[in-house]
Image (cartoon, rainbow, N blue to C red):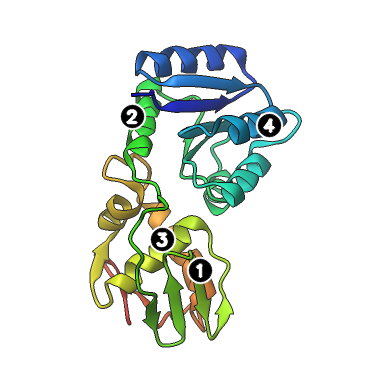
């Protein structure tokens, strides 16, 4: 069976070699690109199973590369950033990155995240067709990956869409943050549970009449969230 392939888009040569060594030791085929433009071209040509993408890149920065890739594919994207500010993490998640690691990082932790991301199922053309989900004026068509409110299409990021679909499949059920992480990010996800709060906030801004007093996604103090269908 062909090995899973990982594309590393990074301009620090020493880091590229360290990533190559560790990824190949794990059994992955490794592709590399030194800048955003060539990284985008390689991703389109090689169709890797996962992309490790630095934020600060020459030619075309990682934020823009991630934005373009997310429009074209559902390939898992793990972003690397030398910055620790919350805004960098938020931007990375908002444009569709699946996870992020702040430099300097533990290579063992990064390899664990790579393994976890590659274990998550990706959509296939043979996936079973599902009936659209509806809650009043809110509708979600999982197979078409479309959501609408009052007949107007909602522009949701991939993880926002998945979160909304999870809630609408389970109206009235209370989810803890850990349960949401396990459902959407995988049980091996190592990141902060605040990731859930960020995505809930973004989703409320798009589906609630008044996000400050939500009527659909209810906060359960000390537990998590419940969707009122």
160, 141: nearer the viewer: 141
Residue marked by disc 3: 162
Q: Which mark is residue 185?
A: none
The image shows residue 26, relative to residue 150, as above or below, that is above
Mark 4 vs 2, N-terminal side: 4
Residue at the spot x=48%, y=18% of the render?
19
Residue 11 location, x and y as percent?
Answer: 65, 21
- Give the residue at x 51% y 65%: 202
Local secondary structure at mark 1: strand
Circle 4 residues within 10 Å: few <14, some 14–19, many ≥20? many
- Decide which of tag 4 and tag 3 comes sooner along the chain: 4
Query: Can residue 56 be seen?
Result: no
- Say whether disc 4 or disc 1 marks the residue closer to the N-terminus: 4
Badge 4 is on which residue?
36
With 207 as the anchor, is 170 left or right in this view? left
- Between discs 1 and 2, the one toward the N terminus: 2
Q: CA distance from mark 2 to mark 3?
A: 23 Å
The answer to whether residue 205 is above or below residue 93 is below
For the residues labelled 4 and 3, the Cα–Cα distance comes to 28 Å
Select label 4 or label 2 by which is in front: 4
Q: Marks 2 and 3: which is nearer the front? A: 3
Q: Give the quarter of the figure containing the C terminus.
A: bottom left
In the displayed structure image, the side of residue 158 where residue 126 appears, left or right: left
Q: Tell me where residue 102 appears, x and y as whole percent.
A: 50, 33
Mark 1 residue crowding within 10 angstroms, few (<14) / some (14–19) / many (20+): some
Residue beneath disc 1? 146
Residue at mark 2? 112
Mark 2 crowdedness (10 Å alpha carbons): few <14, some 14-19, many ≥20? some
Q: Residue at x 25, y 78 (%)?
A: 172
Query: Residue 144, percent across and down?
Result: 48, 65
């Amino acid at each position: 069976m062909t090995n899973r392939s990982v594309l590393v888009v990074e301009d620090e040569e020493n880091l590229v070699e360290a990533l190559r060594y560790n990824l190949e030791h794990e059994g992955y085929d490794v592709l590399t690109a030194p800048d955003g433009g060539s990284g985008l071209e390689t991703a389109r040509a090689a169709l890797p199973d996962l992309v490790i993408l630095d934020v600060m890149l020459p030619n075309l920065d990682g934020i823009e590369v991630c934005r373009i890739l997310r429009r074209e594919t559902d390939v898992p994207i793990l972003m690397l950033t030398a910055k620790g500010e919350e805004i960098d993490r938020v931007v990375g998640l908002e444009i569709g990155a699946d996870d992020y690691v702040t430099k300097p990082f533990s290579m063992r932790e990064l390899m664990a995240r790579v393994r976890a991301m590659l274990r998550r199922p990706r959509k296939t053309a043979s996936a079973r067709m599902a009936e659209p989900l509806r809650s009043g004026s809110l509708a979600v068509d999982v197979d078409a990956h479309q959501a609408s409110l009052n007949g107007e299409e909602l522009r949701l990021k991939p993880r926002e869409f998945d979160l909304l679909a999870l809630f609408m499949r389970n109206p009235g059920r209370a989810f803890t943050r850990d349960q949401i992480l396990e459902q959407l990010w995988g049980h091996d996800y190592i990141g902060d549970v605040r990731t859930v709060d960020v995505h809930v906030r973004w989703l409320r801004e798009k589906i609630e009449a008044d996000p400050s007093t939500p009527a659909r996604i209810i906060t359960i103090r000390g537990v998590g969230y419940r969707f009122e269908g």
